[in-house]
């Protein structure tokens, strides 16, 4: 009986040690907090002036193409439109770059921004660098 108790204590101790080592190897939540840049796209001064549907289609095709390019470069992490709101907010980008100036240079490559359909605000935004926010281009099936 003593032998069975001793074997059980040894097995329990080994299991506890292995479990503690696994827990210490896990990342702590928030351990990889990283700064990104949140871009709020707002209705620009030229939005109502550009009424030609062909011109608008061309501008927005360029807008979506530019987003695709930034995504493929690993810069654009999130993009999407806002629903109807009491602000002039139209959409957002979350960009992975070092400085606000760099984020602004990326935003200025957008044809809708160049045309004045959108204007923008850029503010720092932090998130854990996992999932969509992991470095580089992330593709999920």
Image: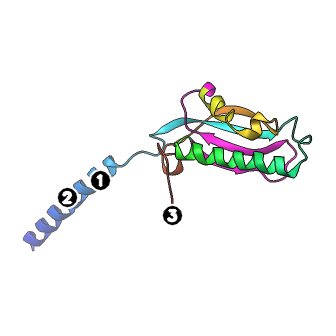
Give residue 10's position: percent from left, percent from top. Answer: 14, 62
Give the spatial CA distance, label 1 vs label 2. 14 Å
Q: What's the magenta region? A: 76-101
Q: Which of 80 and 25 is in front in this view?
A: 80
Q: Residue at x 62, y 42 (%)?
A: 94
**Residue 99 among those drawn in magenta:** yes
Q: Position of residue 11 (x, y in %)?
A: 17, 64
Quarter of the figure with the N terminus: bottom left
Task: Please state which of residues 24 and 92 is positioned toward the viewer in this rendering.
Answer: 92
Badge 3 element: loop
Q: Residue at the location (76% across, 40% down)?
A: 112
> On the image, numbered disc 3 is attached to which residue?
141
- Under tag 1, what secondary structure? helix
Q: Give the quarter of the image for residue 42.
A: top right
Q: Which of marks 1 and 3 is in front?
A: 3
Outermost residue on the bottom side: it is 1
The answer for how far apart the CA atoms under marks 3 and 2 are is 42 Å
Q: Is residue 125 left or right of 33 when viewed as pictured? A: right
User: Mark 3 vs mark 2: which is more N-terminal?
Assistant: 2
Mark earlier in primary sequence (1, 2):
2
Residue designated by label 1: 22
Examine the image and state in which quarter residue 116 appears.
top right
């Amino acid at each position: 009986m003593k032998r069975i108790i001793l074997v059980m204590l040894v097995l329990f101790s080994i299991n506890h040690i292995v479990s503690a080592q696994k827990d210490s190897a896990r990342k702590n939540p928030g351990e990889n907090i990283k700064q990104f840049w949140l871009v709020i796209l707002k209705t620009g001064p030229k939005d109502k002036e550009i009424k030609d549907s062909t011109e608008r289609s061309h501008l927005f095709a360029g807008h979506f193409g530019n987003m695709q390019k930034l995504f493929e470069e690993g810069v654009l992490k999130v993009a999407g439109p806002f629903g109807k709101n009491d602000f002039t907010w139209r959409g957002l980008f979350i960009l992975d770059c070092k400085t606000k100036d760099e984020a602004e240079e990326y935003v200025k490559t957008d044809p809708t921004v160049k045309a004045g359909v959108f204007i923008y605000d850029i503010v720092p935004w932090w998130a854990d660098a996992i999932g969509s926010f992991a470095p580089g281009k992330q593709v999920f099936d």
